[in-house]
Image: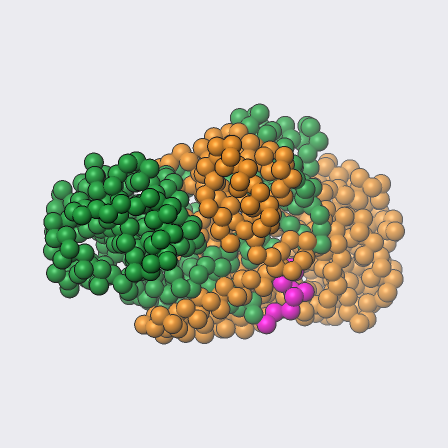
Chain colours: A orange, B green
Amino acid sequence: MVHSVRIVGAGLIGTSIALALSAKKIAVELVDVDPVGLALACDLVGCVAVSEPELIIFATPLKALSEVIEEQYHLNPNSTFMDVCSVKTEPVLKVKASSLPLNSFVGTHPMAGREVGGAESARGDLFLSRSWIITPTPESDPSAVALVKDLISELGATVIEMDAAEHDAAVARVSHLPQIASSLLAAQLHNIPDKWLELAGAGLRDTTRIAASDEKLWKEIIHSNADEIRELLINLQNDLSEMIESLPDQEAIAAIIANGRQGRAKIPGKHGGKAREYTYLPIVIDDKPGQLGAIFNECAAMSVNVEDLAIEHSPGQLNALITLALSDDDAIKLSNHLSSIGWNVHPIRK
Amino acid sequence: MVHSVRIVGAGLIGTSIALALSAKKIAVELVDVDPVGLALACDLVGCVAVSEPELIIFATPLKALSEVIEEQYHLNPNSTFMDVCSVKTEPVLKVKASSLPLNSFVGTHPMAGREVGGAESARGDLFLSRSWIITPTPESDPSAVALVKDLISELGATVIEMDAAEHDAAVARVSHLPQIASSLLAAQLHNIPDKWLELAGAGLRDTTRIAASDEKLWKEIIHSNADEIRELLINLQNDLSEMIESLPDQEAIAAIIANGRQGRAKIPGKHGGKAREYTYLPIVIDDKPGQLGAIFNECAAMSVNVEDLAIEHSPGQLNALITLALSDDDAIKLSNHLSSIGWNVHPIRK
C-alpha cells in the first residue's frame, strides 16, 4: 500500500487523484507552477507537505514533462515516478533523455473523462470503475510497478497492462482517429444554411458529438501520437478515394457500407463482453418532465435492464422519440407491457 | 381533405401510410409486385380496392419508379401523384421522361426511421411529429400541392417545403455525408485486436453508431445523390490531406479541431431552436434495473427537463456512467438535489 505521494500538476487529473488519496488518509502533496490554481486545489484537498514521497505523479501537460522530471528526480532520487499522459511512447523518451533512471518510472494513462479541466472540476471518484492503463518498460522495477498498481487500486480503477507502443497504437485507433474523423466531418457544416441544419437527425448529432472537444488538449495528443495517426489517416484517405470512385456503382457502394457495418459490429458490448446485437425499442413520449421517469419505472417493475438509450427530437415538435437498447427477451416483454398500458411503442428493431 | 388513396409499394413507408389512413376511414388501396408482402400488409391494414384514387403514392425503391409511374398514370390519368424517395432530383427526372405530366406530381421525403424495413415493421404512428419534406416543381398544380399537404397533415407530420435540388444538397450534408464518414471510420476497425477494442469509449461508439445501417438502402440513396456527395467527399478529402500535413504542427492541428468544434456548434438544439450549449451532468449508477427510473423520478420531482442523455460502461465493471444534458439552471438544481440525497454525482461539465 502507498503511504505518501507528491503530485506535480493541480489540474483535473492531479487534483482528482489528490482528493481520492486525501480521503483515504494517505499523505499527499500537490505542487504546480500556477499559484492560483494550486491554492484552489489545496483548499479542496487539504494538502500537506511531503518531504520524501514514495511515489511522485507527473500530472502536467506533456510539454512540461522534461522539466518536472529533472526537477523532481533531483529532489527525490529514491522515489518511484509515474505519469498520466494520454500518449505513452513520448514520456518514456523524455525519461530516457533525463537523469531519471528508467527502472524507477512507470507510464500510465487513466481512461477518465477528458472534456473537463482544472482543479475546480476535480472529483475523488473520477476514476471509480474506469480502466487505467499502465505501460511498464522491461527496465521498470517490479516494486515500482507494484506501487503504481496499488495507487490505481486505491483510486478504484482497473489496471490494464500493455507496452507503450501498443497503447499508442490502440488509442490511435479507438480514440484519436474517431476524434479526427468527427472534427473533420463537423468542419463540413460551415456555410450550410440554418434551414438545412434543422433537418439534422440523430445520425449527424452522434457522429459529430466529440467534435465539441477542446483543441488545446487534442493538439498535444494528436501531435504526440502523430506516427500512429498518420498511417491511419492515410488508410482512411485511401478508403475515401475508393468511395469517391465507387459512386457510379451501387454494388461497390454497398460493399463499402457493409464493410463499415461489420467493423462497427466488432466493438464489444458493455462489461468487456463480446459485441452484442441489442434490440432497439422506439417509444414516442411527450417532451416534458416525468415521461422518462415513468418509462424507467416500468422497466424496473418488469425487471428490464436498459443497455443503452438515445433521445431524438423532431424540429418544431414537442414530442421526442426515445430508443431503448435491450436484450431480445427484455425488448419483447417491455414492448408488450408498455403497449398494454397505453404507451406509444413503435415496432421493435434489431 | 383527401378521400381516396392508392399506395404502390407495401414496404415500411407504404404500409405505415396505409395504416394511418385506414384508421381515419380514408379509402386506401395497397398494391405491390410481391404477393406475399402485399398479403401481410393487407391483413394489417384491411385494404380495399379504390377504382379512381384521388392520390397515388409511389412507395417503391427508386429503381422501380419509372415502371410504376408509367403503369399508374395510364390507369388513372386524372389522379395526383407523389413519391416518398430519400432523394428528390432523380424522381423528377423520371417523371419528365415518362408520360405523367409534371403538374400532377409532387416529390416528397418523410424524415422517418429508416433502419426498419418491411410491412411487418409498419406503424400508423410512424410519421407523428416527424418532418416531411415536399419538393413541388414550378409546374406542380397548386391543387396537387394542397392535396399532398393534406395527406401529410393527416399523418401527423410537419410539412417543410424546398425545391428538389435544395433537398438533395441538404440531405447530402446532414445525412449522407455523416453516413459515409461513419461507415468509413467503422471500416478501420477490422484487424484490430479485441483487447484494443475493449478500450473503446463513448466517442468511438457514437461516431460509428450509424455505420450499423443497411447497405441495401444506402447504396441506392448514395448512388442517386452521387453528384452532391462527390463534391462533399472531395472537400473532406482535402481537409483530411490538410490534417495529415498538419501533424507536425500543434497549432495547425488545434486550428482544425477548433474548426470542427465551431461546425458542431451550428447544429440546432431540439424544437428547431438555436443551437444550445447544454450543461452535462455525469452520474455514476449501479448497472441494475431501477437506477435510471429513480434518477428520472428525481428529475420529474424537481421539474427538471432532460434534453439528452448517454450511458457509458467501463469494460469489466458493473457500474455505468450516465450523462444528462440539461439547461444551466436545471443542472445546478438537479446536481445539488441528487448529491444531497446520496447519488454519486460528478462535477458539472459545460
Q: Is residue B342 above or below residue A282?
A: above
Q: Is residue A113 visible?
A: yes
On the image, the x and y values in percent for residue A131 come to 70, 55
Question: Residue at point 44% right, 61% down?
Answer: B214
Residue A92 appears left or right of B59: right
A205 part of magenta stretch: no
Question: Residue at point 72% right, 43% down?
Answer: A125
- Splitting the image into 4 quarters, where does residue B341 fall? top right
On the image, the x and y values in percent for residue A263 come to 54, 66
The main secondary structure of the magenta stretch is loop
Residue A42 appears left or right of B130: right
Residue B162 appears left or right of A228: left
On the image, the x and y values in percent for residue B90 come to 24, 61
Give whichever of B20, A197 is nearer the camera. Answer: B20
Question: Residue at point 83% right, 54% down?
Answer: A150
Q: Which residues fall within the magenta stretch?
A: B191-200
Give whichever of B75, B321 is nearer the camera. Answer: B75
